[in-house]
Amino acid sequence: MGDFRYDTQLLIEGTGLDEDEIYDYFIAHFKGDSLLAVGDENLIKIHYHTNEPWLVLEYCSKLGEIFDIVVEDMFRQSRGLKG
């Protein structure tokens, strides 16, 4: 089991989004791993393992509308429980 508990996934819809800037912000400001930030200037898909998903959601909500939000507890999943 890894060090990070929550598998955090979401979509950001907005204008002028930059996946490289978002990726760099995550690396500089959040502890986690398995980061994916892919898309275009209007829609970005985020996937990130972290212990503080609420910080990820707060930041992403400042970039645009966030939706299709999934936060799964990987520690529970590893014990065979619903995440």
Image (cartoon, rainbow, N blue to C red):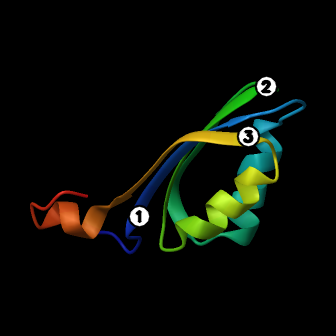
- How far is the residue under mark 3 from the one under mark 2? 10 Å
Label placed on residue 65: 3
Image quadrant of residue 55? bottom right
How packed mark 2 is, by other alpha carbons closer than 10 Å (few <14, some 14-19, many 20 or more), is few
Q: Which residue lies furthest to the left in this view?
A: 80
Question: Callout 2, which amino acid?
Answer: Asn
Q: x and y percent of residue 41 in the render?
A: 82, 26
Q: What element carries label 3?
A: strand
Residue 45 % position (x, y): 60, 35
Relative vertical location of residue 67 with respect to residue 39 in this rendering, above or below: below
Q: Is mark 1 on a helix, strand or loop?
A: strand
Say which residue label 2 marks.
42
Q: How far apart are marks 1 and 2 (CA)?
A: 26 Å
Q: Dividing the picture into quarters, in which one does residue 43 lie? A: top right
Of the 4 image quadrants, the one containing the N terminus is bottom left
Residue drawn 87% across and 30% down?
Answer: 15
Tell me the kind of residue under disc 3. Glu
- N-terminal label among 1 and 2: 1
Residue at 76% x, 48% y: name it: 22
Sequence order check, earlier mark of 3 and 1: 1
Left or right, residue 39 beside residue 69: right
Q: Is residue 77 found left or right of 73 in the rendered image?
A: left
Q: Which residue is drawn at 78% across and 58% down?
A: 25
Q: Nearer the viewer, mark 3 or mark 2?
A: 3
Which x, y percent locates residue 52?
54, 73
Q: Which mark is first along the chain, 2 or 3? A: 2
Dot 1 corresponds to which residue? 6
Which quadrant does the C terminus fall into? bottom left
Q: Say left or right for 10 vs 16.
A: left
Disc 2, SS: loop
Q: Position of residue 57 (x, y in %)?
A: 64, 58
Task: Please state which of the two labelled residues, at mark 3 or mark 1, is closer to the viewer.
Answer: 3
